[in-house]
Amino acid sequence: METGIYQLREALAKAQELELDLVEISPKANPPVCRIIDYRKFLYEQKKKQKEIKAKTAKIVVKEIRLGPNTDDHDFNFKMKHAIKFLQEGAKVKVGVFFKGRSIIYKDKGEYVLLRFAQELEEYGKVERMPKLEGKRMFMIIAPKK
């Protein structure tokens, strides 16, 4: 395909001769820049590129584990094994302590459980968000180590 600077009529005639489309690429340039291309093919390739970009983006999965302020050691270890598995798969883990009824007075116990959980998972992941109380729930987020 030839390149060069044409006047508008010449460019349209050339595009019709090649059975292609005249597309304005940069309208703000002086003079405006146009290109003779197959517009449908151009749109198809743009869609294809955007699909590839979307497919390459990392999909972050967040798994949630629920604990109580008085969680027993066996339950704690059981849930910790699940968290290790999630972190090894590359998912983030959202660990929450849920306070029911009057158990909200044991906020310090809940924070202790979360910090202990983080300490146990230290070699598999790092704490992304420290324990934070939101209503009757205390959450912490742990991200996998690279």
Image (cartoon, grey):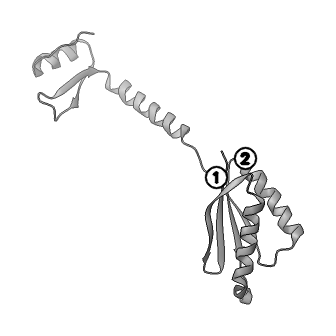
Relative to 21, does residue 143 appear above or below in the rendering? below
Residue type at mark 1 is Val
Give the quarter of the image for residue 12.
top left
State the residue at coordinates (55%, 38%).
55
Answer left or right for 129 relative to 15.
Answer: right
Mark 2 and mark 1 in contact (Cβ < 8 Å)? yes
Q: Which residue is mark 1?
A: 61
Q: Residues within 10 Å of mark 1 (few under 14, many from 20)?
A: few
Give the quarter of the image for residue 107.
bottom right
Between 13 and 112, the one nearer to me in the picture: 112
Relative to 99, does residue 12 appear above or below in the rendering? above
Question: At which x and y percent is residue 2?
Answer: 23, 9
Q: Secondary structure at mark 2?
A: loop
State the residue at coordinates (60%, 50%).
60
State the residue at coordinates (80%, 60%).
80
Q: Give the quarter of the figure containing the N terminus.
A: top left
Extreme right residue here? 74
Relative to 70, does residue 102 appear above or below in the rendering? below
Give the number of the disc on residue 26.
none
Residue type at mark 2 is Glu
Question: At which x and y percent is residue 37?
Answer: 29, 21
Q: Secondary structure at mark 1?
A: loop
- Count the numbered circles shown: 2
Q: Which residue is mark 2?
A: 89
Answer left or right for 58 relative to 17.
Answer: right
Q: Give the quarter of the figure containing the C terminus.
A: top right
Question: At which x and y percent is residue 36?
Answer: 25, 20
Relative to 22, does residue 71 appear above or below in the rendering? below
State the residue at coordinates (76%, 67%).
116
Question: At which x and y percent is residue 97?
Answer: 71, 74
- Of labels 1 and 2, earlier in sequence is 1
Observer-side mark, 1 or 2, equals 2
